[in-house]
Amino acid sequence: MNTRIWSLAKKEFIHLINDWWMPVFMLVGGAMELLLVGWATSRPITNLPLAVLDQDRSAASRVFISRLENTGTFQTADEVLELEEVYDLMRRGAVTAAVILPPDYAENLLDPLLQPEVAVLLNGAESIPATSALRAIEGVVRNVGDEILLKTLAVPEEELSGFEPRLRVWFNESLSEALYTTPAELGLMLEFTVLLFAALSFSRERELGTLEQLLVMPFSSMELIIGKSIPVVLVGFTDFLLMLGMVHFAFGVPVRGSLLLLLALALIYLLVELCKGLVISVISRSQHQAFLLVMMVGMADFMFTGYAAPVESMPQVLQLAANFVPAHHWLEILRGILLKASGLAVLWPHILALVLLGLAVGGFSIRYVRRALD
């Protein structure tokens, strides 16, 4: 049995040598995308285009504009002269936000009986930059409001005591978005790599016309799967080590938990995705069809990983469906070990789910591989 499995694995390695671009693309392509995503998300949102219509033209309005620029969120504000110009900039997407200061801004600011108003327009078509712009503007408005309140009450600022929460952030002290997105991107790139690599195994044999020769040889279904899986596991695990080193050294994602536990669970996850890829491979009639199925399955998994939107905020039926997606459990494991130093006592439900999903999909592969290929 060992000899037959090694013969199959050797044949797969020969295919890899002949089609060397495939493993190179899997390794380099995933690592490059991870690098670009990590680099793009590791920086705070800054330099957002801002338009200002200052109808007051007073010292107070200029101070307000300077405060907006000093937040670091916006570029130097582009002052416009007419309201229609503001609308035109918003329609063309030239600005993320626009601030309109009315003609009586300074007058209302000085009068304790009046309330100054500022109009804010946001480009909701780009929700993430618009949210960052709104937070920056709200911070400036809050500071101005506090100053008005101090002047109205005639209380020295140093004597005023208010409610201040004591904030402590766990696991991601700087609230860096890269510590959330890069582990998720690592998990998704690993899934696509293994799925695509495994899905092309039997479909490539069918296109090359060597599948019939393989089926008439004295190989069991288990031997076929193990022999063709060894190169996939090696390439996938190498890809995981490469990307793990990248997120740690390039983006500062810590490894607070057990590295040995992480490597062992990564191997289990690779085997689960390998089984999914083999199922796609045996039901596909060509490599092109296998590639399309991988894209379809991968994009469906993407929605249930919590990468784009938290799973907890989804409808209850979708939260239940996420339990049948291996990538969902893998990202919980990955973030838990990297950021929270979680161990088996915390992660065992996700590990158990991975094992059960792997047994179900792997059992299907072993039982129906020959029937599907015939």
Image (cartoon, rainbow, N blue to C red):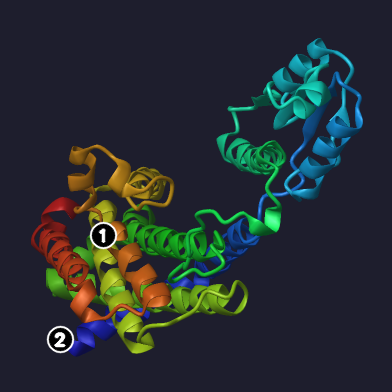
Q: Tell me which corner region of the image, top left, top right, bottom left or bottom right, holds residue 153.
A: top right
Q: Which of pointers 2 and 1 indicates the residue nearer the eye?
A: 1
- Relative placement, left or right, of 31 versus 166 is right
Tag 2: amino acid = Met
Most extreme residue toward the top, as rendered?
84
Q: Which mark is residue 135?
A: none
Residues 300 and 140: in front is 140
Q: Tell me which corner region of the image, top left, top right, bottom left or bottom right, holds residue 79.
A: top right
Give whichever of discs 2 and 1 has the lower sequence position: 2
Q: How many marks?
A: 2
Name which residue lies at 81% across and 22% down: 107
| Residue 307 percent across, percent down from the top left | 42, 52
Q: Secondary structure at mark 2?
A: loop
Relative height, residue 102 to residue 36 (above, below): above
| Residue 190 percent across, percent down from the top left | 42, 65
- The answer to whether residue 12 of the structure is visible from this angle is no
Q: Residues within 10 Å of mark 2 (few under 14, many from 20)?
A: few
Relative height, residue 279 to residue 67 (above, below): below
Residues 255 and 353: in front is 255
| Residue 223 percent across, percent down from the top left | 17, 76
3D distance between C-alphas at marks 2 and 1 = 30 Å
Tag 1: amino acid = Pro
Residues 67 and 32: in front is 67
Q: Which mark is residue 1?
A: 2
Q: Tell me which corner region of the image, top left, top right, bottom left or bottom right, holds residue 357.
A: bottom left
Residue identifier under label 1: 326
Name which residue lies at 33% across and 44% down: 300
- Relative placement, left or right, of 344 versus 309 is left
